[in-house]
Amino acid sequence: MFPVHTPPTSEWLCSHGILSWKFPPSLGSYTLIGRSRAADATSLYIPELDILLDCGCLVTTAHPSSIFLTHTHSDHCLDI
């Protein structure tokens, strides 16, 4: 596995292949929860905005108010 660069002012946690990363306060109080693996699955949830970016895999049990797709390859839209 490749090392993951983490800025010293951010917080992150990895569990079951799902990464949770808190943006530094200078960028806003947002949390990015998700997983991305090329040609496999991509899904990123931002709970503070209640949005999901792509839905190629299940990363939350929440039902987001909006889902945005970057493109329609199956690894980005499989779980619609």
Image: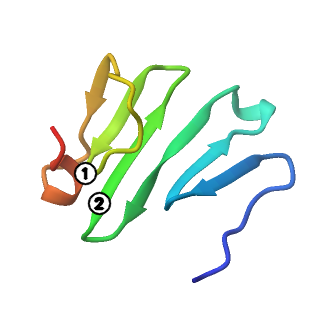
Task: Kindly identify the amino acid type of the residue bearing the numbered disc 2.
Answer: Ala
Quadrant for residue 28, please give it: top right
The answer to whether 42 is drawn above or below residue 37 in the figure is above
Name, please, the residue furthest toward the bottom: 1
Q: Position of residue 9 (x, y in %)?
A: 85, 46
Of the image marks 1 and 2, the number of the one nearer the N terminus = 2
Mark 1 vs mark 2, CA separation in Å: 5 Å
> Badge 1 is on which residue?
56
Q: Residue at x 70, y 50 (%)?
A: 12
Q: Position of residue 38 (x, y in %)?
A: 32, 70
Q: Residue at x 40, y 44 (%)?
A: 59
Residue 41: image tag: 2
The quadrant the N terminus occupies is bottom right
Q: Position of residue 43 (x, y in %)?
A: 36, 47
Q: Is residue 35 left or right of residue 32?
A: left
The answer to whether 66 is drawn above or below residue 21 in the figure is above
Q: Secondary structure at mark 1?
A: loop
Q: Secondary structure at mark 2?
A: strand
Q: Are marks 1 and 2 in contact (CB under 8 Å)?
A: yes
Task: Kindly identify the amino acid type of the residue bearing the numbered disc 1.
Answer: Gly
Q: Is residue 33 left or right of residue 53?
A: right
Name, please, the residue furthest toward the top: 65
Quadrant for residue 80, please give it: top left
Label 1 neighbourhood size at 10 Å, few (<14), some (14-19), many (20+)? Answer: many
Q: Residue at x 29, y 50 (%)?
A: 57
Q: Residue at x 35, y 39 (%)?
A: 53
Q: Position of residue 67 (x, y in %)?
A: 27, 29
The one of 24 and 35 positioned closer to us in this rendering: 35
Q: Is residue 34 left or right of residue 57?
A: right
Label 2 neighbourhood size at 10 Å, few (<14), some (14-19), many (20+)? Answer: many
